[in-house]
Image: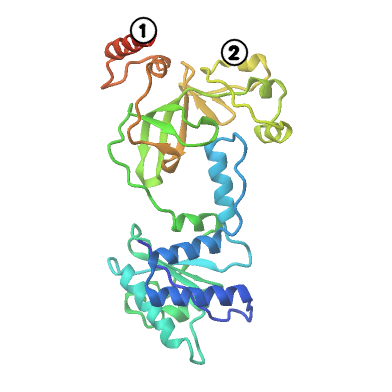
Amino acid sequence: MSLLYSSVSNIDHVVLDEDNSGSRRLQNLWRDSREEALGEYYMRKYAKQSGNDFPGGSEELSDDITQQQLLPGVKDPNLWTVKCKIGEERATAIALMRKFIAYQFTETPLQIKSVVAPEHVKGYIYVESYKQTHVKAAIDGIGNLRMGFWNQQMVPIKEMTDVLKVVKEVTNLKPKSWVRLKRGLYKDDIAQVDYVEPSQNTISLKMIPRIDLDRIKARMSMKDWFAKRKKFKRPTQRLFDAEKIRSLGGDVSHDGDFMIFEANRYSRKGFLFKSFAMSAVITEGVKPTLSELEKFEDQPEGIDLEALSKVHYNVCILSIHF
């Protein structure tokens, strides 16, 4: 679990009522040692505005929009990486918190906003402040941060949300196993695992695409098409047909064994190969139906199509008797 810490210091003489009340709430949270409540505080702090889901948009588009909303603005403090003694990241963050409390009512309070020590990051901690000089003043005298005193790196704004990203632990997910999509254009669709990237918390899937041929015929981008249509109608599942797409004016290129259309990869058999965040898929207890299995040409491991056919046949007979 990440360790978070926030100050109520006056940074560059910018004092907002909201910041003051938020800081007082945060101090109370620290006093009560309620880590879950702390997490809630930071979620509210960095996600004050929640956008509406893009109607029928792809999972990546929805995730990108969400991430954009979480990004800090130009008036927010920066995040700095500081080298730390390996294995002492959490203890060092606590030491920095105690130093802040000790200096809080002196003539030289620490002008930092928070400290983050993600459990999966070794040898570094993150310090939030408006200026690098504020970071140096805060870490001065902390033994575990000696190696990071002279050099701190600012985290780019686009990468700041990744610092607090929770990596979902993935177990028993192997190539050719089955998952379902949770939301977006492919909600509830069955997909076959191509490969998993645990370090990136992503999964690459083989699936049947849903391409709106009317949109291609109108030669409109997905964004413009959704904006124009009052009611979104999800396209039907169909294997990718390069000739059909070209005949409608679509631009299809090749990259090795794959065809590329609108930045998506398609196999020569027409399947879509696409990466999703692990949070976008259901992995537990997913069982494809017989009709879904028939759409994927190869018989997957651990699935007896003949047995499934018999079950399907028996169900049909029973339904006739009733």
Rendered location of residue 131, percent (x, y)? 55, 74
Q: For this rendering, which residue is in front, 153 or 223?
A: 223
Colouring style: rainbow
Residue at the image point whose x is 47% and y is 62% from the top? 40
Q: Which mark is residue 321?
A: 1
Taking 72 as reference, is 107 above or below it?
below
Rendered location of residue 230, percent (x, y)? 71, 32
Q: Which mark is residue 243?
A: 2
Observer able to see residue 112: no
Q: For this rendering, which residue is in front, 164 or 139?
A: 164
Residue at the image point whose x is 45% and y is 21% from the top? 257
Rendered location of residue 203, percent (x, y)? 40, 37
Q: For this rendering, which residue is in front, 136 or 34?
A: 34
Q: Earlier in the sequence, mark 2 or mark 1?
A: 2
Q: Label 1, secondary structure: give it.
A: helix
Q: For this rendering, which residue is in front, 84 or 288?
A: 288
Going by the numbered disc 2, the residue's amino acid type is Glu
- Quadrant into which the C terminus falls: top left
Going by the numbered disc 1, the residue's amino acid type is His
- Quadrant into which the N terminus falls: bottom left
* Circle 1 residues within 10 Å: few <14, some 14–19, many ≥20: few
Number of labels in the image equals 2
Q: Label 2, secondary structure: give it.
A: helix
Residue at the image point whose x is 37% and y is 16% from the top? 290
Rendered location of residue 86, percent (x, y)? 29, 66
Taking 283 as reference, is 82 above or below it?
below
* CA gap, disc 2 and disc 1: 47 Å
Position of residue 132 in the picture relative to residue 286 (left or right): right
- Residue 232 sits in quarter: top right
Observer able to see residue 66: yes
Q: Residue furthest bottom?
A: 107
